[in-house]
């Protein structure tokens, strides 16, 4: 998980100061020393670390903390606020042109995820903001890049404008914008060429496109896994092009966090979105405050709720709940519920959004084993329709057949049947208890 090392260290540090009724300068010194080490180890730019620590120290030994009734908690509040500020403070918005289309230019080095992110951004604009984007293939050096964008366009059922590889990218961009106006596409997202390294010719070409089409946004796509390199790349692109924002990809990997925590401070350009996986719906609006909260183990319940709202069909969820209460819940329902939760992403990530999850030592060892869940799914999928509806028909030969079909053992099948039975019993008890309570209230 991203930020894991940093999160662990920071949480240990703040845990020690949290409950203190009195915080001395010595306490603050010790804490800031630990914070400094944690940030350096997470590959945060050293100058950024220095300024950050100085700010935290100044505030932590200042009045707001020393004179408060809960100084330990005040110190943590300071750390959280400064972390949030470091990542850009307020969540930043995406531009909307006075007269459509709004033009977004995507720039970045090869392999950072620029083309994929172009598709993801278009998808997000449509899904979250109800927009109708057009994609533009302006990387004329790599036919593969054009094909890739066209494939993404097909997957998304979205128009992709391309003129092949022997036209000038500025021409392509201009014609695309005319076409977008005619077709009423309100966003035009231009996928420009990348190179392996920052290079003069590339910058020249990008500047030319910028001058000619006057984009409303210039987003740099950088790979979070590359740490300080990502920060250097951002600095170079920003000097040449005056970016309007950064999109950080591969935050789903185990990046230490250096790029996310340094880019805003170094370039003064906000991180607007974060790539959280390879799939087209795995791009998220970047919320500095929520990210700071996650790093400090305070959870990110807001994002969790949003994920649930995006992935769980509320009406179906109510129906399933009703079935659970009335004990008519079947293995098919169970399967459906598991898949809804799974749509929200890896369980480990979801747990990371709960406050204090990092601190629950037990949870770390439990390791919500995705494999285990696949096994359960395989077992249920090997049951016949009748067995799923009514497990009481289960006998030895049926269990053997299911075990064989799912590649699991009979004792695993037995365990699942038992768990399912216990779950139903428990639901029944809870429902009865609730009924009992209601009944009493009604009479009283
Ligand atoms: P480009 O050369 O910059 O256009 O890069 P591509 O869009 O071709 O992406 C390079 C690789 O990174 C592809 O395999 C993508 O699937 C992958 N990728 C892009 N964004 C993400 C992300 O947020 N998370 C993960 N895990 N992979 C990503």
Image (spheres, rainbow, N blue to C red):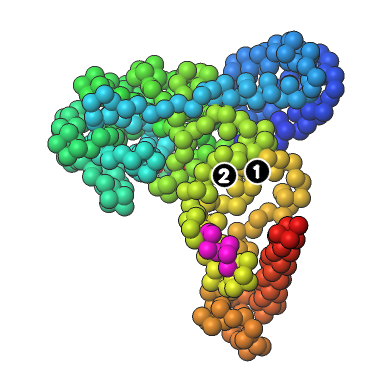
- From the image, which quarter does the N terminus lie in? top right
Residue 129's label in the rendered image is: none
Residue 354's label in the rendered image is: 1
Q: CA distance from mark 1 to mark 2?
A: 8 Å
- From the image, which quarter does the C terminus lie in? bottom right
Residue 437 visible in the snapshot: no
Judge by depth and name the residue closer to the eye, 407 or 93.
93
Magenta region includes residue 196: no
Measured as percent of width and height from the top left, residue 435 is found at: 70, 64
The image shows residue 34, relative to residue 285, as above or below, that is: above
The magenta-colored residue range is: 317-323
The residue at 23%/29% (across/down) is 100
Measured as percent of width and height from the top left, residue 114 is found at: 37, 37
Q: Earlier in the sequence, mark 1 or mark 2?
A: 2
Left or right: 161 in relation to 255: left
Mark 2 — residue? 304
The residue at 68%/40% (across/down) is 355
For the residues bearing labels 1 and 2, Cβ distance under 8 angstroms: yes
Judge by depth and name the residue closer to the eye, 45 or 361.
361
The image shows residue 399, relative to residue 326, as above or below, that is: below
**Could you say whether the residue bearing mark 1 is in a helix, strand or loop?**
loop
* Numbered-mark total: 2
The residue at 67%/35% (across/down) is 298
């Amino acid at each position: 998980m991203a930020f894991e090392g940093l999160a662990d260290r920071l949480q240990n540090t703040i845990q020690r100061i949290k409950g203190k009724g009195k915080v001395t300068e010595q306490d603050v010194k010790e804490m800031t020393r630990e914070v400094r080490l944690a940030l350096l180890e997470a590959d945060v730019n050293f100058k950024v670390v220095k300024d950050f620590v100085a700010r935290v120290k100044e505030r932590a030994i200042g009045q707001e903390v020393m004179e408060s009734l809960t100084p330990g908690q005040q110190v943590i509040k300071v750390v959280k606020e400064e972390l949030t500020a470091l990542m850009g403070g307020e969540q930043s918005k995406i531009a909307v042109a006075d007269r459509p289309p709004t033009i977004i230019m995507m720039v970045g080095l090869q392999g950072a995820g620029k083309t994929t992110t172009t598709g993801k951004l278009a998808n997000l604009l449509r899904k979250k903001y109800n927009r109708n984007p057009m994609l533009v293939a302006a990387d004329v050096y790599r036919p593969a890049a054009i094909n890739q964008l066209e494939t993404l366009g097909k997957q998304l059922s979205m128009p992709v404008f391309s003129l092949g590889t022997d036209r000038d990218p500025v021409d392509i961009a201009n014609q695309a914008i005319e076409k977008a106006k005619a077709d009423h596409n309100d966003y035009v997202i231009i996928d420009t060429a990348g190179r392996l390294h920052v290079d003069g010719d590339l910058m020249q070409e990008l500047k030319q496109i910028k001058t000619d089409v006057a984009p409303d946004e210039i987003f740099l796509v950088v790979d979070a896994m590359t740490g300080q390199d990502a920060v250097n790349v951002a600095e170079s692109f920003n000097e040449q092009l005056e970016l309007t924002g950064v999109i950080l990809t591969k935050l789903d990997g185990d990046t230490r966090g250096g790029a996310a925590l340094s880019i805003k401070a170094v370039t003064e350009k906000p991180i607007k979105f974060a790539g959280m996986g390879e799939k087209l719906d795995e791009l998220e609006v970047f919320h500095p405050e929520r990210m700071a909260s996650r790093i400090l183990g305070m959870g990110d319940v807001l994002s969790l709720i949003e994920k649930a709202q995006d992935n769980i069909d509320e009406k179906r969820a109510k129906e399933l709940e009703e079935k659970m209460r009335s004990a008519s819940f079947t293995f098919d329902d169970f399967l459906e519920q598991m898949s809804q939760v799974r749509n929200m992403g890896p369980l480990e990530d979801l747990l990371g959004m709960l406050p204090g999850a990092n601190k629950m030592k037990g949870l770390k060892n439990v390791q919500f084993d995705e494999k285990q869940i696949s096994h359960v799914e395989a077992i249920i999928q090997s049951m016949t329709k009748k067995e799923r509806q009514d497990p009481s028909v289960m006998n030895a030969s049926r269990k053997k057949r299911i075990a064989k079909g799912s590649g699991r053992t009979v004792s695993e099948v037995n365990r699942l049947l038992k768990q399912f039975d216990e779950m139903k019993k428990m639901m029944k008890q809870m429902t009865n208890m609730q009924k009992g309570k209601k009944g009493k209230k009604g009479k009283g």
